[in-house]
Image (tube, rainbow, N blue to C red):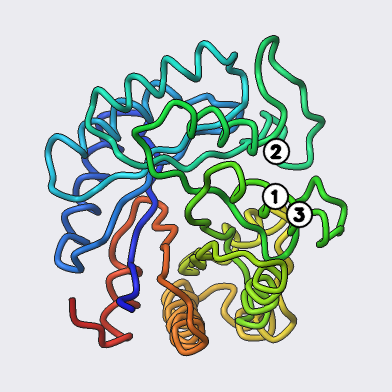
Amino acid sequence: MRSTFSFEFFPPKDAQGEARLWQAMEGLTSTAPDYISVTYGAGGSSRDRTIAITSEITSRTKIPTVAHLTCVGSSKGEILDVLNRYRDAGIKSILALRGDPQGGPSAPWVSTPDGFTHADELVSLAAEFGDFTIGVAAFPDGHPASGGNFDKDISTLLRKEDRGASFAITQFFFGVEKWSSMVNRLAEAGSSLPIIPGILPITNFKQLVRMSDLNGTPIPAEILQIFAPLENDPDGVRKAGIEIATKSCQELLAAGAPGLHFYTMNSSTATREIYTNLGITR
């Protein structure tokens, strides 16, 4: 089966950011991505910008888009309005997420009146609405809110699949064995949900540490050792990060991963280099 390759962008805050976004997107066009996803901000803060930029990508390019949809700060009626706007824009796929409160993944969850608390409820609504292929999130290191209960995370994924999800994209992680463990656990439970690994090219170590702390993704000691002597060497950090990501992608594809989803941070260069290193023709 042909592996899928896809990229995630976040909605820009200003005209300069939008120019960088389109430049990055043009830089990745040659890889013939299967789709592009566009995120919401924490607390649903960028919802309108997400709708606008996803709709524009759909109208300006031939690349399929996957629009993020979250429970945060939205009532059922508001979510239905977003689904209608996505459908009217020609968007065919969504990524249904609980979403992070303003304080981050571990912050207390505050339900919106007439809203949802869990992503599986959002999946049910989107499936009932129709017209969309539905993706969800997976967490090889465990969701921060699950308190290390991996059984709970597996049960949550199974419930999302049962309610209409047809694929999942993981949070970034380190170690192919974590992806394999999740896939094996799901298969043992009778699941056929494709689990697409999320890949974060490391080009800024401080940024990696910040995101790892936020998402509860542990950085292995061997990775820390590689970057320790490169604190004042940004070019060295970038080179090492691309090598690490390339090796991880090779191992994941060899282990049977159905595709790779790159968290681009709205920059195309590192992702394009990794893609070239993999020697894949489309």
> x%, y% of residue 142?
75, 59
In the rendered structure, are the residues bearing label 2 and label 1 in contact, judged by CB atoms less than 8 Å apart? yes
Sort mark 3 into few (<14), some (14-19) or many (20+) by Cα contacts within 10 Å: few
Q: Amino acid at mark 2?
A: Gly
Q: Which residue is mark 2?
A: 104
Q: Is residue 264 left or right of residue 43?
A: left
Task: Looking at the image, tell me whether mark 2 or mark 1 is earlier in sequence order.
Answer: 2
Using the numbered discs, state the Cα–Cα distance from disc 3 to disc 1 in whole angstroms: 23 Å
Examine the image and state in which quarter residue 239 appears.
bottom left
In the rendered structure, are the residues bearing label 3 and label 1 in contact, judged by CB atoms less than 8 Å apart? no
Q: Secondary structure at mark 2?
A: loop
> x%, y% of residue 111?
74, 20
Q: Amino acid at mark 1?
A: Leu
Residue at (65, 72) in percent of width and height: 187
Using the numbered discs, state the Cα–Cα distance from disc 2 to disc 3 in whole angstroms: 23 Å
Q: Amino acid at mark 3?
A: Ser
Q: Which residue is mark 3?
A: 155
Using the numbered discs, state the Cα–Cα distance from disc 2 to disc 1 in whole angstroms: 7 Å
**Residue 214 badge:** 1
**Which of the two residues, 249 or 14, is positioned nearer the viewer here?**
249
Q: Is residue 56 left or right of residue 200?
A: left
Quadrant assignment for the C terminus: bottom left
Examine the image and state in which quarter residue 163 appears.
top right
Foreground mark, 2 or 3? 3
Residue at (52, 24) in percent of width and height: 45
Task: Looking at the image, tell me whether mark 2 or mark 3 is earlier in sequence order.
Answer: 2
Q: Secondary structure at mark 3?
A: helix
Q: Is residue 58 left or right of residue 167?
A: left
Residue at (41, 76) in percent of width and height: 235
